[in-house]
Amino acid sequence: MKTIHVETTINGDATEFLCAPDESLLDVLRDRLGLTGAKEGCGTGDCGACSVTVDGRLVCSCLMLGAEAQDAQIETIEGMADGETLHPLQRVFLEEAALQCGVCTPGILVAAKALLEKNPDPTDTEVRYWLAGNLCRCTGYDKIIKAVQTAAAEMRGA
Amino acid sequence: MKYVKPESFEVASQLLQNESGTSRILAGGTDVLVQLKAEMVEPDLMVDLKHLPGMQDITAENGGYRIGAAVPGAVVGEHDGVKAMWPGVVEGLELIGSTQVQGRATMAGNLCNGSPAADSVPALVTAGAMARVHGPDGARDVPVADIPQGPGKTNLSKGEFITSIFLPARPDHAGDAYLRFIPRTEMDIAVSSAAVSLVLDAAGTCRQAHVAVGAVAPTVRLVEKAGKALEGSQLDSDAIAAMKTAVEAACNPIDDKRGTIEFRTKTAAVLAERAARIAYSRAGGQS
Ligand SMILES: Cc1cc2nc3c(=O)[nH]c(=O)nc-3n(C[C@H](O)[C@H](O)[C@H](O)COP(=O)(O)OP(=O)(O)OC[C@H]3O[C@@H](n4cnc5c(N)ncnc54)[C@H](O)[C@@H]3O)c2cc1C
Ligand code: FES
Ligand code: FES
């Protein structure tokens, strides 16, 4: 298979990589670029552990080819903190222990950030539906929903 | 596998026509990349058309809307004009997958993947939506209802693909709705589904009614008799009963662990009744 040369922007940095035509963006991020925050839970769009945003849209990076990243603006969990300062969602997840094993956490944080940018004051039901594509096998979700709401309130300055 | 981004629709058609192996269009990839991963299909050629003119646009046209074949569900769901005119089409599309899947999944991909349970298709069929098909001989317009052929199969020929889907204008007093049955509240495939589109007169009598069902036959099915049963009525109980009988008669579902033949047939009719009542109230009718 012929490799493809791709130029893209990841977390604000111009990036280029070579990939196989059938290689997923998730595999490119993890195996070629060392960005291992996005996880592979299923590889088929069901679990959301691989969530990133592409041109501002939340997507599963396992359901996109690396080749499709040409000229795109990609944001991953690695770009969420500002240097040493955690994003409020990240900090609140730690403070309120909204994780156990943590495999789902990067995807949930990326997804929750995308939600709060669109809807800064969601209801619990809206949070649950938005995160329906992010599976967590450990927490039972309640702490995740609460942590998202705590961070949302803080971000609204409430 | 080759991945190509052709510079025009013409080149795309040629590439597809000249490919001797298996080819796929890459729209949102939410079906095709899952199938690739599962080794259900191993395409020799993957053609990405998302960058071509109009593919990402929603444009007003002749009182309706033309939706580019690469526009994902999330973008349609944020379009106030389409939502106001065709709420049933939008609710069907928005039922597909999760937020993440919505960020990629397209109507054209849902249609061309050919699943009998495809959630956006019944309401496109009752809307009388037209697909603009580009092929080796240029462009033609095909009713969405005529695209599916059977599970995983379409009536498009080699070298053909959809560039946009057109939702026609709506008169006053019109409404549509889509409902599906799934055993959970999110992230599941329809066991049965129904879409209804109605046009009423000022007095609230149905002048035009279309009813389509999903997941109960090899393709999504427009049930003409069911639509006729509602026309001339204000959804009184006789008209509804006749509509449901017509829907049940049109069902020819599979029997599997997700739903028996009896269950799928019965729920399709019940969903059609409920969708008709929602469409009726969206059209401004008082029942
Ligand atoms: C987690 C998950 C949940 C899902 N849930 C649902 C659900 O609830 N309901 C449902 O209906 N579906 C569901 N799906 C399936 C899928 O998301 C939809 O069918 C979606 O609409 C496919 O669109 P796409 O743009 O991703 O298509 P792709 O995967 O890009 O393409 C699908 C097929 O259509 C063909 N194609 C694509 N575009 C064109 C075109 N313009 N012209 C001709 N052929 C074309 C391709 O060659 C391919 O065969 C789900 C998928 C996942 C991963
Ligand atoms: S790894 Fe992408 S959704 Fe599970
Ligand atoms: S914390 Fe383990 S999967 Fe969510």
Image: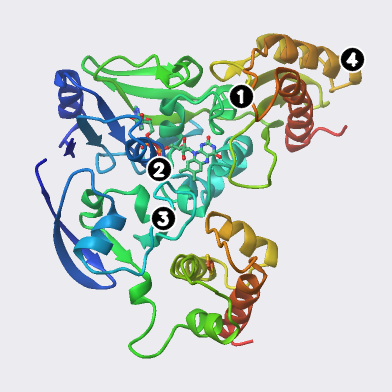
Label 4 crowd bin: few (<14), some (14–19), many (20+), radius 10 Å: few
Mark 1 secondary-structure assignment: strand
Q: Does the residue labelled 3 lie within 8 Å of ligand 2?
A: no
Mark 2 secondary-structure assignment: loop
What is the quadrant of the C terminus of chain B in the image? top right
Q: Which of B196 and A46 is in front in this view?
A: A46
Quarter of the view holding residue A156: bottom right
Q: Distance between the residues labelled 2 and 3?
A: 14 Å
On what subunit does the disc labeled 1 rest? B
- Residue B6, percent across and down? 16, 36
Residue to which mark 2 is pinned? B71
Residue to which mark 3 is pinned? A59
Ligand 1: give its quadrant: top left
Q: Nearer the viewer, mark 4 or mark 1?
A: 1
What amino acid type should be assigned to the residue bearing mark 2?
Val
Residue to which mark 1 is pinned? B214
The earlier-in-sequence mark between 4 and 2 is: 2
What amino acid type should be assigned to the residue bearing mark 4?
Asp
Mark 4 secondary-structure assignment: helix
- Side of B241 where B195 appears, left or right: left
Q: Nearer the viewer, mark 3 or mark 4?
A: 3
Q: Are marks 3 and 4 on the same chain?
A: no
What amino acid type should be assigned to the residue bearing mark 3?
Val
Q: Which of B185 and B28 is in front in this view?
A: B185
